Image (spheres, coloured by chain):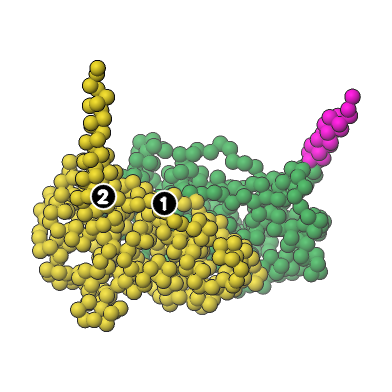
Chain colours: A yellow, B green
Amino acid sequence: MSLKPLLTLSTALTTLLATGLVLAQEPIQPIALVHNINLAQVELGKKLFFDPRLSKSGFISCNSCHNMSMGGSDNLKTSIGHKWQQGPINAPTVLNSSLNLAQFWDGRAADLQEQAGGPIANPGEMASTHTLAIDVLASIPQYRIEFEQVFGKGEIDIDKVTVAIAEFEKTLVTPNSRFDRWLMGENTLTEQELAGYNLFKNSGCVACHNGPAVGGNSFQKMGVVKPYQTDNKAQGLAGVTGNDADRFKFKVPTLRNVELTYPYFHDGESDTLTEAVEIMGKLQLGRTFTDEENALIVSFLKTLTGDQPSLILPILPPSTDQTLRPTPFD
Amino acid sequence: MSLKPLLTLSTALTTLLATGLVLAQEPIQPIALVHNINLAQVELGKKLFFDPRLSKSGFISCNSCHNMSMGGSDNLKTSIGHKWQQGPINAPTVLNSSLNLAQFWDGRAADLQEQAGGPIANPGEMASTHTLAIDVLASIPQYRIEFEQVFGKGEIDIDKVTVAIAEFEKTLVTPNSRFDRWLMGENTLTEQELAGYNLFKNSGCVACHNGPAVGGNSFQKMGVVKPYQTDNKAQGLAGVTGNDADRFKFKVPTLRNVELTYPYFHDGESDTLTEAVEIMGKLQLGRTFTDEENALIVSFLKTLTGDQPSLILPILPPSTDQTLRPTPFD
């Protein structure tokens, strides 16, 4: 009798057990695949996400600042709004944003649906109004039909618009990163990347950057050990709670796909991961990473880039003679 | 012996012959499918077409004004350029643009490759320079590798960039419109649409709007019978030839997908097809269409909407620490 099958089984069991052990012990969990999704809402929401007619100018869509070709961000320090206004804060990635405990850097929106209504009517962003945006959509027969197919009979309203956009955004997860595959037992990381992860864990980064999104699940003060110097006026959570103790508390950003979502921090003032890791070490942990340590952590962070959503660009239904035209230069 | 098979054959032959006859006689030909395409260049060109890092701001890509969700146009009177500058002219659709005899309204670019270099370096559009754009691309390893895979060893240069973009644009054709299927013998048009087509033919519209693109193959004076009134300063072909006789001569726009490419004319001053048909009748043909005639022609024009290109949104390679950052607000 050959021992080979038994040995193979034993190896497989060991791997499985080790994986279970790894998963149980690690402060970061793999991104879960999406389930319980309303596909009809997703398809409609995708159109709305890409439709610049939700803006006053007819030029800015959700995708302008949460560009699905660029990690769900615009890769600018702060975003460009209506009439080229300079936004007050760095646009957070829409990728995996369903995993956040709240939306916006200051958490002022409870969920994706509440968030989606904000930029449409923000004079510094898309500069439309909910009424105008709905009037535009309701003037387009293909949209009227699709809203009825998705939500049943009744008028289009802002709730239906934001429900659909939020449902689309829930699909924007990025599973299968090399790090997640390592978590699940595959041998996908280099020694350098593993050393970087261990340093990330042992030096305390995981205190805030943990869970499936490697962040996004708490508000923390920017500048725990040393104050953060910035010209940016954002006050963080204090603007929502009115509590002075919440000044400079921001939602911890997800580190998923962080290689794609430069520049970093709420003011977008860090252009590179190297600089961001250095500043985080000093300000949050009171620790100066050596160049070698910094490079190890950066190499780990780049393993968090997952499969980017594969999206067929939607073809938008055309405006009709009755549709109000955009007014970009008024 | 049954006669049925013979009769069926005879019917099929009659249809084929009739189709050949129709095709031979009609002034409009079906959009041909794309052949002789370099797919490697297409894939690279698609990335470049969607990459806003070709602009100074990092915000404007080719797709911003030639939006593939909106008939390859921006549906604005005149486009929005760097720092929200108001463009001088209506952005023509990129769809089927390979069929044009020259590019831009005034034909100042001989072909798509020459066109593609223009907006990148135009201070009122993407406001970059060819040198800066190439520096950005060359700083990104994934682009360096892909350019070598596509063009062989050597530095990235603007010719390679524009060759790739042009090759991608050559794929943006829209076959299978209901009108083309009618041309090929299918029974896809209503009586009203056919009456509209006959009126379009018999009243002289086809003198300029003919061929596979239903336009795009000649320069013609805007305002043949009566002068066109506009505040727009564009002079047309005269600006290219220096010949005063070419004042107000513009490339005849394609009418393919015209339902999607509102507003109309080089100044974008016509919001609706109804208005555009009315003005064309009066100014080019000296003819006032009745409301009923106008509606017939408009119903025909809407049969020219073809299959829109189905594009998977490209995932752009991220910038590196060495990549020059965009400067939208400088």
| Chain bearing mark 1 | A
Mark 2 and mark 1: span between their CA atoms?
18 Å
Q: Return the x and y of residue B311 as percentages of the image width and height.
A: 51, 49
Q: Identify the residue at image location x=23%, y=32%.
A: A11
Tell me whether marks 2 and 1 sit on the same chain: yes
Looking at the picture, tell me which residue is in the foreground, A196 or B86.
A196
Looking at the picture, tell me which residue is in the foreground, B193 or B221.
B193
Element on which disc 1 rests: loop
| Chain bearing mark 2 | A
Looking at the picture, tell me which residue is in the foreground, A49 or B260.
A49
Magenta part, dominant SS: helix
Q: As displayed, is residue A149 above or below residue B212?
A: below
Residue that mark 2 sits on: A302
Mark 2 vs 1, N-terminal side: 2
Residue that mark 1 sits on: A309
Element on which disc 2 rests: helix
Residue B265 appears in view: yes
Q: Return the x and y of residue A77 as percentages of the image width and height.
A: 31, 65
Q: Residue A198 carries which label?
A: none
- The 10 Å Cα crowd at callout 2, few under 14, some 14 to 19, many 20 or more, is many
